[in-house]
Image (tube, rainbow, N blue to C red):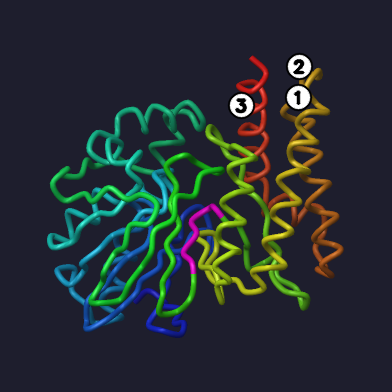
């Protein structure tokens, strides 16, 4: 059976077991023996998903909504398969993401350009299209009514132009995907969680990211549920840290602008030093090697995304 983490207000999550343990979470809201699911991880998480349903004593037919924060494949790669399993579900996704769910060819090509074909296939499996008639396009101010439980949608660009965040009015919490950073449990200390910005390719936009984080903070949520990895508190403190990091990422990238040969390595190295210093200041005992192993993929993708953004803005 899949282990379920239970929170207040009938919110649950389980570890998708994507890449490693406690890297990606799939969240559920349960009401009247019905489920709303937020993000799907990949096709490889489908068996764990079914096991989680059994743990909650819920059938796939009782899933009413599958909501995607955005269409990056660690969040949406399993959507087609889960929609096939959950015949009564509707899929909610940002209006810019609908076409990618109906025809995932361009999305797949983009992922292959980042990871390479072999690694993309290993990580995600075959993408399954979703019937357009079962998709609900989401934008700013839309409301999902799930068993009379209201979830408000906010447009949330910065990490991706097709990103939404979901505010659950009952729990006063956001489900943020990658729009309010990443917080791995291994980086939590007695001082609380450590969050860091994800600037992965290809739609990082610092000004829009600032706006999104401020928008989340303005709602004064009690907590945020991150896909990587689940519940965080201290929203004001963490929000200001994320705003600061965006500016620090930009400074690092612009200072490396003229270093064409090993620019990505330079940016990656400086991101490592920036975040490692912050984590040590957060009173966490972790070696440089452990930190590098934990954040290796994130640092590489963040550097790629920053270079892509900087090249685009300086054309």
User: Judging from the image, what secondary structure is the residue with disc 1 in?
Assistant: helix
Secondary structure beneath label 2: loop
Which label number is shown at residue 308?
Answer: 3
Query: Going by the image, does 166 lie left or right of 184?
Result: left
Is residue 6 found left or right of 306 in the rendered image?
A: left
Mark nearest the camera among 3 and 2 is 3
Q: Is 94 on the left-hand or right-hand side of 183?
A: left
Tell me residue 130's x, y (percent).
20, 44
State which region is magenta.
174-179
| Callout 1–callout 2 Cβ contact below 8 Å | yes
Where, quadrant-wise, is the N terminus in this rendering?
bottom left
According to the picture, the residue beneath numbered tag 1 turns out to be: 263
Q: Nearer the viewer, residue 150 or 281?
A: 150
Dot 2: within a 10 Å radius of its alpha carbon, few (fewer than 14), some, or many (20 or more) residues? few
Disc with the residue nearer the chain's start (3 vs 2): 2
Marks 3 and 2 sit apart, C-alpha to C-alpha, by 13 Å
Displayed quadrant of residue 26: bottom left
Which residue does the numbered mark 2 point to in the structure image?
260
Magenta stretch: includes residue 176: yes
**Residue 145, horizontal then vertical, whole percent:** 26, 69
**Count of residue discs:** 3
């Amino acid at each position: 059976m899949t282990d379920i983490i239970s929170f207040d207000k009938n919110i649950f999550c389980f570890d998708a077991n994507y890449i490693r343990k406690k890297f990606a979470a799939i969240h559920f809201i349960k009401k009247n023996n019905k489920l709303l699911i937020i993000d799907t991880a990949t096709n490889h998480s489908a068996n764990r998903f079914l096991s989680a349903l059994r743990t909650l004593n819920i059938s796939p037919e009782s899933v009413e909504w599958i909501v995607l924060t955005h269409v990056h494949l660690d969040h949406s790669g399993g959507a087609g398969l889960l929609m096939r399993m959950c015949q009564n579900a509707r899929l909610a996704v940002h209006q810019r993401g609908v076409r990618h769910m109906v025809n995932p060819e361009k999305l797949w090509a983009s992922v292959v350009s980042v990871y390479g074909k072999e690694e993309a296939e290993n990580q995600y499996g075959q993408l399954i299209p979703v019937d357009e008639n079962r998709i609900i396009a989401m934008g700013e101010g839309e409301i999902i009514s799930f068993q009379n439980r209201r979830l408000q949608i906010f447009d949330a660009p910065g990490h991706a132009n097709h990103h939404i965040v979901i505010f659950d009015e009952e729990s006063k919490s956001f489900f943020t995907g990658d729009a309010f950073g990443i917080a791995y449990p291994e980086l939590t200390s007695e001082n609380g969680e450590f969050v860091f910005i994800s600037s992965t390719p290809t739609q990082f936009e610092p000004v829009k990211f600032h706006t999104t984080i401020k928008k989340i903070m303005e709602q004064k949520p009690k907590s945020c549920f991150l896909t990587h990895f689940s519940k965080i508190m201290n929203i004001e403190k963490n929000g200001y840290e994320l705003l600061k990091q965006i500016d620090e990422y930009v400074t690092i990238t612009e200072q490396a602008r003229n270093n064409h040969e090993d620019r990505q390595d330079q940016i990656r190295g400086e991101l490592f030093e920036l975040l490692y210093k912050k984590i040590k200041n957060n009173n966490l005992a972790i070696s440089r090697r452990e930190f590098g192993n934990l954040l290796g993929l994130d640092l590489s993708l963040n550097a790629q995304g920053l270079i892509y953004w900087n090249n685009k803005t300086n054309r």
